[in-house]
Amino acid sequence: MSRLRLFLTALLFPLIATAQLPRVGDFALLDHRGAFHQMSRLSNKQAIVLITQSNACARTPAIVQRINALHENKAEDFAFALLNSTPQDDRAAVIQATQSLRPEIPVLMDTAQSIAESLGANQAGEAFVLNPENSQVLWRGAAASADLERALAAIESGQSLPASSTVAGTRTGIESDCAIVYSAKDRHELEGISYAADVVPILERRCVSCHNEGGIAPWAMSGHQMVQGWSPMIRETILTRRMPPGQVDMEVGQLKGVNELTAAEQQILLHWIAMGSPMDANEADPLSTLSVANPQWPLGEPDHILTIEPQTIPATGLLDYFYATVVNELGEDKWIRQIDFNPGNRAVVHHAAAYLIDKGSTDPRGRSYLLGWTPGRTPVEFPDNSGQLLPASKDVLLELHYTTVGYETTDQTQIGLYFWDEPPENVMRDEPIVNAMFRIPPYEANYQTQASRVFENDILLYALTPHMHYRGKDMRYTAIYPDGTSEMLLSVPNYQFAWQYVYDLAEPKALPAGTRIVVSGSFDNSAQNPFNPDPLWKYGLVSRLMMRCLLG
């Protein structure tokens, strides 16, 4: 039934005069509370209604009142959101300015102004009605206008929409406190953007470590022509927040090594692409001479290498976890100071974990966690004179999650171990926080669950490792201290199954004995989740969430 309705909608939309209105394309933004919203995931709605908002605009209370009323009457068929494209309006200020906003309505934080620019928005209080299938603007006008209701009624009935009442590009007669000022766009149009001086440094910082010859990305940024040719996709991945991978809510916690584009970097790349991705006149191409090394063992040759037998991966199908025991032949206890996973075939190894298991045992339940690997993860170097013990009485059990890629292939994963000459002062451990079992109802778009653990000793926290599967939507770590105060340590608003990161804290965090760590997450089992294999399935799983810490 839903598929039929969407097909009919697609037939009706071309009857609407939209030639003079922009097609924005799919995009995603965080809202004023840090939640992730992507327009293509609203395909179960007939249309999306965006109303521009700015804290300084005197009309903000009226704008909030207006969208509240629309939402109350039309929420079943339409998605509603405010769009804040004023860079100086931070999230705390937006929350304060929109206190009377219904909690279901997000304020999308368009800090880089990329969405407002694509829409051609001029001021707060403008309404844009979008087709959720392709973000084509179907109607635009004043949010206060009765034509907005007429436009929504026309979409519901399949009739022609009223004429848009605001002409794109018109910026006269706007109150100064309500105007959207595009300072970066105006500056870039006036001064231009240099490929060599402005664009390439961003690509080097954010992209080239993966997008190089022999890197894990599917294409290499080997020169201007390659980047120019891929520029439409670069634009799409920026607007949908797909790249760089591993993005977090940067307003939560203190992390290091997170590879996320700043608003200024987004503006440079998007404006340069809009200009046609030009090359500088009479300038050499710095990307063409850039060399990125991809050594098999970035830390150098390991002291000891664990290797599984070659495994054949079929062309298709969903595969159960594969377990392989590697016999520990060292003959003595060893303290690990560094460890590195080397997947034999990164195309099929989704993630891997190493466990210690009693020699001769075949029961994976009697295991203790050593370390894991996920795409994008770098070798682990234990800090502060710490390490993990590999006892002579234990073998190593590898758990591998393989995914099929459409053709039969093989994998032979290895683990490189680097040892201390003497026992270290501190023991580093990865501590699991587990929710044993839960079931997600069919078609549930926002199933929420949590796991928690109280640590009875003082601990020094170094890193957090969220882990979910296809239906994973978001995840947050919160510390609740013995005195009752709490602190959010990490928020991953858009969990990506293909990229599972270890998030290192900028500085180790001392947590007193009695601290409870609560890990909360949401799952999307709806048909709107593009990664969902089957929304009809009542999905149950063990959710494992790791913390790397020194125990007191």
Image: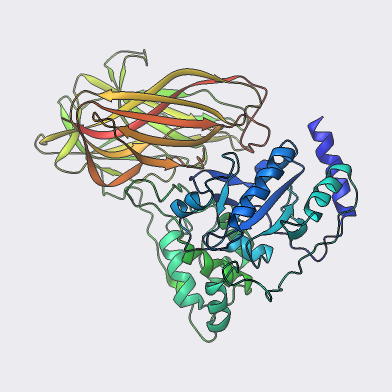
Res 144 → quadrant: bottom right
User: 284 or 506: which is nearer to us?
Assistant: 506
Above or below for 520 versus 53: above
What residue lies at 68% left-to-right and 76% top-to-bottom? 172
Q: Is residue 308 above or below residue 8?
A: above
Compared across the picture, whether 483 is left or right of 75 comes to left
Instruction: Tell me where residue 508 appears, x and y as whole percent.
Output: 23, 43
Residue at 66 percent across and 59 percent down: it is: 125
- Across and down, in percent, residue 490 comes to 38, 41
- The answer to which image quadrant residue 485 occupies is top left
Vertical side of 368 occupied by 284: above or below:
below
Residue 545 visible? The answer is: yes
The mark tally for this picture is: 0
Q: Residue at x 55, y 25 (%)?
A: 319
Quadrant of the frame with the C terminus: top left
What residue is shown at x 46% (from left), y 24% (from top)? 322
The N terminus lies in quadrant: top right
Extreme residue in the bottom direction: 282
